[in-house]
Image (cartoon, rainbow, N blue to C red):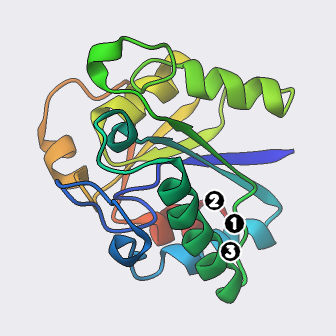
Amino acid sequence: MKLIILDRDGVINFDSDRFIKNPEEWKPIPGSLEAIARLNQADYRVVVATNQSGIGRGLFDMPMLNSIHDKMHKACALAGARIDAVFYCPHTAESHCLCRKPKAGMLEEIGERYNMSLTGVPTVGDSLRDLQSAATMGALPFLVLTGKGSKTQAAVGLPEGTRVFTDLAAVAAELV
């Protein structure tokens, strides 16, 4: 099975320093949904792994997160794309949970769900914590320059082997 793991905010949709708190604020980055469709057509299972500390901060609740993801799934379907699963961490950094990236709990759960090692699995993110989580699992860290990606690229300490792409469409073009 071919698997790819995507962060959500800054990779699939535009990010916001004030969080994506409702479906109206969720807006896809141009080309991202078509990129997911291309990956699907190349037999990739597309999975999202996203920190959603807005829940832990009380900015939105689970029904609202489900509404945001419902909009994302419908937008994907209209573009001929499919996201197989969405894994999320609702905790704040202060909770010190095991699932919040840069820790690897969410990715471990993905590996267990799909009964596979994540070694060599492309994992796309726009922040250092996305890349660190991928590297911990032996996955391939792919940085996109959308979202916080340009700032992340300028920072020091990218995991060894990190590959840099302009956006998710460029990742899809490379993989298919």
- Compared to 69, does 153 lie above or below? above
Name above or below for residue 31 compared with residue 12.
below
* Mark pair 1, 3: CA separation: 4 Å
81 left or right, relative to 97: right
- Whether residue 118 is visible here, answered yes or no, is no
Q: Does residue 140 appear to the left or right of 160 in the view shown?
A: right
Q: Is residue 154 above or below residue 21?
A: above
Of the two numbered discs 2 and 3 in the rendering, the one whose residue sits closer to the viewer: 3
Question: On the image, which quarter does residue 161 sit in?
Answer: top left
Q: Helix, strand, or loop for circle 1?
A: helix
Three-letter amino acid code of the residue under disc 2: Leu
Q: Secondary structure at mark 2?
A: helix
Tell me the amino acid under the disc marked 1: Leu
- Label 1 close to label 3 by CB (< 8 Å): yes
Residue that carries the numbered disc 2 in the rendered image: 175
Residue located 54% across and 39% down the image: 88
Residue 127's disc number: none
Instruction: Kindly check if marks 2 and 1 are in contact, taking CB atoms under 8 A apart as contact.
Output: yes
Q: Residues within 10 Å of mark 2 (few under 14, many from 20)?
A: few
Extreme-bottom residue of the structure: 78
Q: Please state, as top left, top right, bottom left or bottom right, where the N terminus lies in the image.
A: top right
**Residue 8 visible to the viewer:** yes
Q: Quadrant of the C terminus?
A: bottom right
Q: In the rendered image, which residue does mark 3 sit on?
A: 38
> Mark 2 vs mark 1: which is more N-terminal?
1
10 lies left or right of 5: left
Residue of label 1? 39
Residue at the spot 20% in from the left edge and 44% down from the top edge: 153
Measuring from the top left, give residue 75's x and y in whole percent: 59, 81
